[in-house]
Image (cartoon, grey):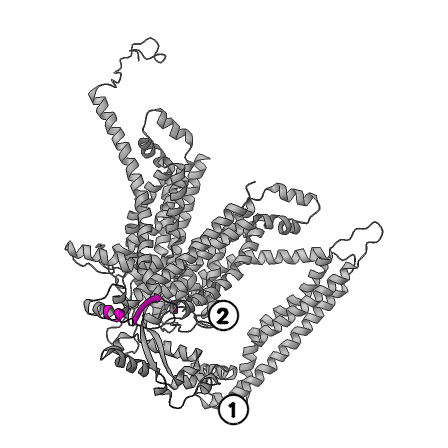
Amino acid sequence: MPLSMIAVIVLALGAIAFAAARSKARLFKPVGTERLHSRPNYHAAHMLLWVVVPALIFVAMWSFVAPRLINQSILTSPAASELPPPGIERDAVLNEIRDLATGKLEVSFNPAAEQLAPVYRDARDHYTILGGIAAALLAYAGGGYAWTRLRREFRARNRVERAVMVVLVAASLIAIFTTFGIVISLLFESLLFFQKVSPAEFFFSLEWSPQTAMRADQVGSSGAFGAVPLFWGTIFIGAIIAMIVAIPLGLMSAIYLTQYARPRFRAWMKPLLEMLAGVPTVVYGYFAALTVAPAIRDAATWAGIPGASSESALAAGVVMGVMIIPFVSSMADDSLAAVPQAMKDGSLALGATPSETIRRVLVPAALPGVVGGVLLAVSRAIGETMIVVMAAGMAANLTLNPFATVTTVTTQIVALLTGDQEFDSAKTLAAFALGLTLLIVTLILNIIALRVVKKYREAYE
Amino acid sequence: MSDRAPGIGGDLPVTSNPSRWNSDVMQRRVARRYASERRFRRIGLFAVALSAGFLAFLLLSMVINGARGFTQTEIKLTVNFPSIAAGVTPAALSAKGGDEALSGLDLEGLAASEATAAYGENGAALLSDGAWLTLRDAIKSDPTLITRKGEMWVPASVEIDAAAKGRGDTANTRLVAQLKTNGQIKTGLNKTFFTSSDSTDPTVVGIWGAFKGTLLTMLVTALLAFPVGTLAALYLEEYAPRNRWTDLIEVSINNLAAVPSIIFGLLGLAVFLNFFHMPRSAPIVGGLTLALMTMPVIVIASRNAIKAVPPSIRDGALAMGASPVQVVFHHVLPLAMPGILTGTIIGMARALGETAPLIMIGMRAFISSPPTSFTEPATVLPVQIFLWSDEVSSGFVEKTSAAIIVLLVFLMTMNATAIYLRNHFERRW
């Protein structure tokens, strides 16, 4: 990578300039009663910034421009007349030329590539040298400018601090860029998808079979994109089965640990339960697929339940519920702790037993917080991927039977995007539409949950 | 208790039924309430025990399955290398192009024929399909071997391996017992598991390739997410004016922390791969994607750590003439560092166990040699676990569990480090 070499050289120049500016600034002596404004390091840092920043920005831009220029010079060379017309084939040949020139490929498949490889190499060297010279000139010019400002009374610190602030602002803007990146990329691909498949079909039709025809005359490959079975599967596993496991266990664990357990027991058990949230989801998925699912299938077959599958909704849901326990329990923990002590004391003073106090006073008072926690847990469960990919099935069934196989939104996203696909087929685009739906639902759940929790906290503060 | 309630209602006689605590009805009622109290308490304890039991069961089943993955059964084989040498000399093997000369040798056939010679008709079936790799590596490290007979231990097949670990069918178990009395079989530590990469044969797979991919990916993630997250937290906590832009940043960060990880995979696919045309399956793309996912976690943890530094520190520094930037970088940041590092390690631990976003950007490729740069196709430990879990061969079960154990050990080490940092360096003011 010669461009990275240029960057390294620029950085080395910057280091030299830093040292030079620092040693000059150390010799500054205050005149009279005046106090020096900036310490030598600030003068040196100012110098460094002027040498390095413009040159590095140029190198970064050059790394985008140079490949286009190189391609241009290949296409204008006389041997390029044999290249296929612009399109995928030409891109393939160009890739081959690049691999030949960099030594990744040793033998070429295309005779034109063999001829053009030296052209590529020459052009690359030419433009690298050109870029290097320009970067060096920029570094030199920046350094020269900074050197002229390198005087006793120059307020270098203010300049450097302003640069630091720019970096800080840029760092915090990355969050916004990421959000916009997510929204725009999902929205863009989803719009493409909805041009091919109507939103009404996607949101309301009951049939999901996303195969699209490889050939126009192929039979039985119409491709149906009704996502309702997926939504049902996601809700069934994430919001129903998982919650049936997680809510009682999480809530009761929180109650026991905060109200009954001795401090020592609590100090050990709480981190232990939190470990459940730290286990990677792929481990849960493996556990569900290897241990839980076969056990549930055997139990169902033994009990004579029809439609028992080794990829049951129950297996994925139960294991996901176990994963969610710590979320529910820590949210319940927080909201129980936020109930004013006076309410608890009042109930106990009237003669209620601790369990009556908990059931009739603490839990009803903490209910909004618990509900908020459950909503957060649901939003987490429906976005969970690995457990359902490994333990739930691929068949899109609209069923109430927990022993049957269902599929979820995240499972289908993974299924649609793995394997070789053309990027703008309806099949791959469907994954982005599913992703967008998932994003919107989780965000709405989160907003509601946070609002509920906040309102409830205000009530007692 | 008197028959008249005092105070309220003046002198009006109030009829009341005082509770007779000794009556049978009352005693039964109290007993019922106490029983329900005990029941409730027991249900609570049961919930805690059940949750902890799930964790114990999960870990135990991994350890029991995985322990076998760290051992491998080997079979003694006397190999007559000159029989296939066909003029290849040790000098030719160690010279340049030696690898090609080596790959020209029919080591696979040699292993099979030697096994047949030593163990009879079905001898070749005793050996793993990857047994010849041991021969190749042996010649690679000592080219003079080609001139003589060598005695080697080569990996046994999946069935024999299972039988040696007490899980095979009767025929194989008997065979293993017989081999054992002859001293021709042994089960020992599986070094291959730590030094080799993915393979189609479970007896010669290893995690080194995936592990190296994980290291490269995590390096990219840490180098991006830690500085960006810390700087963003510093800005939001120390300098940001309260206005719409700051609110927008805060809302974005809080929302990003709640976005499902697979969405970040879609982002990586759409932006890094399809828009910027970065290399598929590469650690740099994986690292970037995970960095975007980890950054909000680090920002939130760092903000809490920065908030915990008392204002008097800032006031003191300002009073001594420090500029706002000096206050933050010379005083606040060092004091908040343990908390920031704790948050970073926890965020990195989450990224380390993440699978779904990396599958989206193509890191599920079959990688049979460890990656050597940030742009080469690679895979990571969790994805490797996912890939192995899909394999049909029963030999992969113990390898998958063993890889899970390695992953869990790493996660626990990281979390333990975070707890240690929190307990020993974080100051309470």
Give the image location of residue A288, x and y in percent: 29, 57
Chain bearing tag 2 is B
Circle 2 is placed at which residue position? B374
Q: Is residue A386 left or right of residue A125?
A: left
Give above or below for A432 relative to B325: below
In magenta stretch: residue A57 = no
The Cα atoms of the two marked residues, 2 and 1, are separated by 34 Å
Q: Is residue A354 left or right of residue B247?
A: left
Work out whether residue A439 can be spotted. yes
Instruction: Tell me which residue sits at (38%, 26%) in the image.
Output: A346
- Callout 2: helix, strand or loop? loop
In magenta stretch: residue B181 = yes
The amino acid on which the numbered mark 2 sits, given as a three-letter code, is Phe
Circle 1 is placed at which residue position? A79
Give the image location of residue A204, x and y in percent: 29, 59
Give the image location of residue A162, x and y in percent: 66, 56
Chain bearing tag 1 is A
Q: Quadrant of residue A39?
A: bottom right
Instruction: Tell me which residue sits at (34%, 34%) in the image.
Output: A358
Give the image location of residue B291, x and y in percent: 49, 60
The amino acid on which the numbered mark 1 sits, given as a three-letter code, is Ala
Q: Nearer the viewer, residue B343 or A156?
A: B343
- Callout 1: helix, strand or loop? helix
Give above or below for A80 relative to B205: below
Q: Quadrant of residue A88?
A: bottom left
Give above or below for A252 relative to A411: above
Same chain letter for marks 2 and 1: no
- Residue extending farthest to the front is B182
Q: Which residues are magenta?
A: B177-191
Q: Residues within 10 Å of mark 2 (few under 14, many from 20)?
A: many
